[in-house]
Amino acid sequence: MKIIFASLITLPVFAMAQEPVPAQPSMMSAFLPFLLMFAVMYIFFILPKQKENKKTEQMRGALKKGDKVLTVAGIIGIVAHVDERFVSIKTGETKIDFEKIAIIKLLEADSEKREAQK
């Protein structure tokens, strides 16, 4: 009886000792999902935004008198004067000075010339 009881107690210990121990994952495989997630985010979010910002900066650099523009405040006007940092916009009979960074969209290039052609 003691032999049977002793063998029942030690049987699970021997069974556990014979099971293979799972290998620990390497550091690279642990960080691989995060690297892939960052790569996807970079491709789909960061690169397009950088291209858009570059295009907007080129548009601001190419502003000239007579261009019809839209500002961040929603004001639509015609460029009256362009400086290195500031732009004067004519809206009706009023001239308003803005920083170039406030111009978000070029609506029409040389709108005064187009109006003269009509």
Image: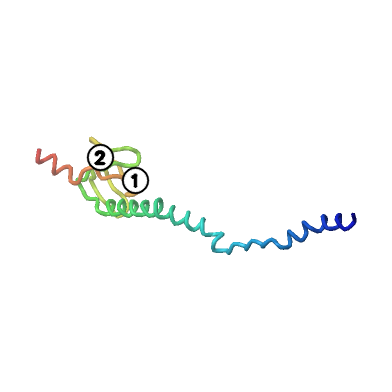
Looking at the image, which residue is at 57% across and 63% down?
A: 27
Q: Residue 68 location in percent, x, y?
A: 23, 42
Residue 84's label in the rendered image is none
Amino acid carrying label 2: it is Gly
Q: How would you rate the neighbour count of disc 1 (Cα within 10 Å): few for under 14, some for 14-19, many for 20 or more?
A: some
Circles 2 and 1: CB distance less than 8 Å? no
Q: Residue furthest top?
A: 92
**Dot 2: element:** strand
Residues 71 and 20: in front is 20
The answer to whether residue 90 is above or below residue 42 is above
Residues 5 and 55: in front is 5
Q: Residue 79 location in percent, x, y?
A: 24, 45
Q: Residue furthest right?
A: 2
Q: Quadrant of the N terminus?
A: bottom right
Q: Quadrant of the C terminus?
A: top left
Residues 44 and 22: in front is 22
Looking at the image, which residue is at 32% across and 37% down?
A: 74
Mark 2 and mark 1: span between their CA atoms?
12 Å
The answer to whether residue 12 is above or below residue 111 is below
Which residue is the site of mark 2?
Answer: 77
> Horizontal placement of 37 versus 18: left or right?
left
Looking at the image, which residue is at 34% across and 48% down?
A: 99
The answer to whether residue 88 is above or below residue 33 is above
Describe the colour scheme in one phrase. Answer: rainbow
**Dot 1: element:** helix
Q: How would you rate the neighbour count of disc 2 (Cα within 10 Å): few for under 14, some for 14-19, many for 20 or more?
A: many
> Horizontal placement of 28 versus 43: left or right?
right
User: Toward which corner of the image does residue 51 lie, by quadrant?
Assistant: bottom left
Amino acid carrying label 1: it is Ala
Which residue is the site of mark 1?
Answer: 102
Looking at the image, which residue is at 29% across and 41% down?
A: 70
Residues 28 and 3: in front is 3
